[in-house]
Image (tube, helix red, strand yellow):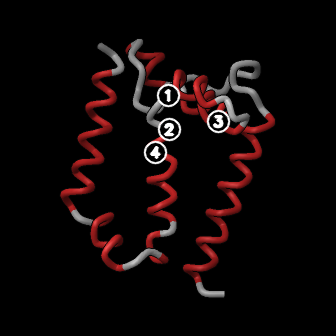
Amino acid sequence: MRSGNLFRAAVAFVAVAALAWYYFRDPAVAPAPRCLLQAITGYDCPGCGTQRALHALLHARVGEAWAFNPAVFFAVPLAALYLLADRLPRRMQRVLYAPAFILAVAAAILAWWIGRNL
């Protein structure tokens, strides 16, 4: 097995295991570690609420997931695109790795971070 395929298989295994974990473990009942940034500053980071949102989404409670962290609806598909990037057409790969696209994603994360704390 090529090292790239082995890495991809390991990432897929970890992703499936994490999804199973979030499906069966309700973060609202059995709290996960608290966000360090929120504990120190009192402000939500861009990822705050993601664990509860994933749990709700895996149980088809879309509205509840949106209320916990709407960014999950954008971050999960984007992460999947990057994980599968080498299987996408070259044109799509060029877009995903273009500095302007990466800066736009970073700007969106920063805007979300600021906006959710206003």
Residue sticking out furthest to the right: 24
* Marks 1 and 3, how far apart at CA: 11 Å
Quarter containing the N terminus: bottom right
Residue shown at the point (60%, 87%) measured from the top left = 2
The answer to whether mark 1 and mark 2 are in CB contact below 8 A is: yes
The answer to whether mark 3 and mark 2 are in CB contact below 8 A is: yes
Please determine whether, in this image, residue 19 is positioned above or below residue 27: below
Q: Give the mark nearest the N terminus, 1 or 4.
A: 1
From the image, tell me which residue sits under label 1. Answer: 69
Residue shown at the point (58%, 25%) measured from the top left = 63
Please determine whether, in this image, residue 5 is positioned above or below residue 38: below
Position of residue 48 measured from the top left corner of the image (x, y, whole percent): 49, 26
From the image, tell me which residue sits under label 2. Answer: 72
Tag shown at residue 113: none
From the image, tell me which residue sits under label 4. Answer: 75
Please determine whether, in this image, residue 11 is positioned above or below residue 34: below
Is 78 placed left or right of 60 in the picture?
left
Q: Badge 2: how crowded within 10 Å, few (<14), some, or many (20+)?
A: many
Q: Give the mark nearest the N terminus, 3 or 2.
A: 3
Task: Give the residue type that dot 1 points to.
Answer: Asn
Quarter containing the C terminus: top left
Q: Which element carries disc 2, helix, strand or loop?
A: helix
Q: In which quarter of the view is residue 16 placed?
A: bottom right
